[in-house]
Amino acid sequence: MARKAKATITDALGRERSATRASWGKIKTQRSGRLQAS
């Protein structure tokens, strides 16, 4: 049971992490695009 709970927690964290990573990637690309444009 503890293992199952741990797996759910890690899965949720992983999803959150990938979501933040995706948003960070968008921000990074926007920033680099601006830097290259200027």
Image: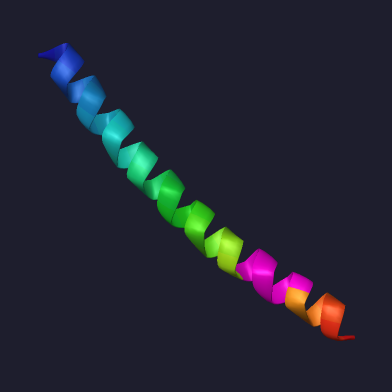
The residue positioned 32% from the left and 30% from the top of the image is 10
**Where 15 sits versus 26, above or below?**
above
**Where 7 sits versus 17, above or below?**
above
The residue sitting at the top extreme is 2
Per the picture, the main secondary structure of the magenta-coloured stretch is helix
Residue 25 relative to residue 1: left or right:
right
Q: How many marks?
A: 0
The residue positioned 49% from the left and 59% from the top of the image is 22
The residue positioned 38% from the left and 48% from the top of the image is 16
Give residue 17's position: percent from left, percent from top.
Answer: 45, 45
The quarter of the picture where residue 19 lies is bottom left
Which of the two residues, 9 or 22, is positioned nearer the viewer here?
22
- The residue range painted magenta reads 27-32
Colouring used for the render: rainbow
**Where 34 sits versus 21, above or below?**
below
Give residue 26's position: percent from left, percent from top.
Answer: 57, 68
Residue 2 relative to residue 37: left or right:
left
The residue sitting at the left extreme is 1
The quarter of the picture where residue 4 lies is top left
**Quarter containing the N terminus:** top left
Task: Based on the picture, tell me whether residue 19 belongs to the magenta stretch.
Answer: no
The residue positioned 18% from the left and 23% from the top of the image is 5
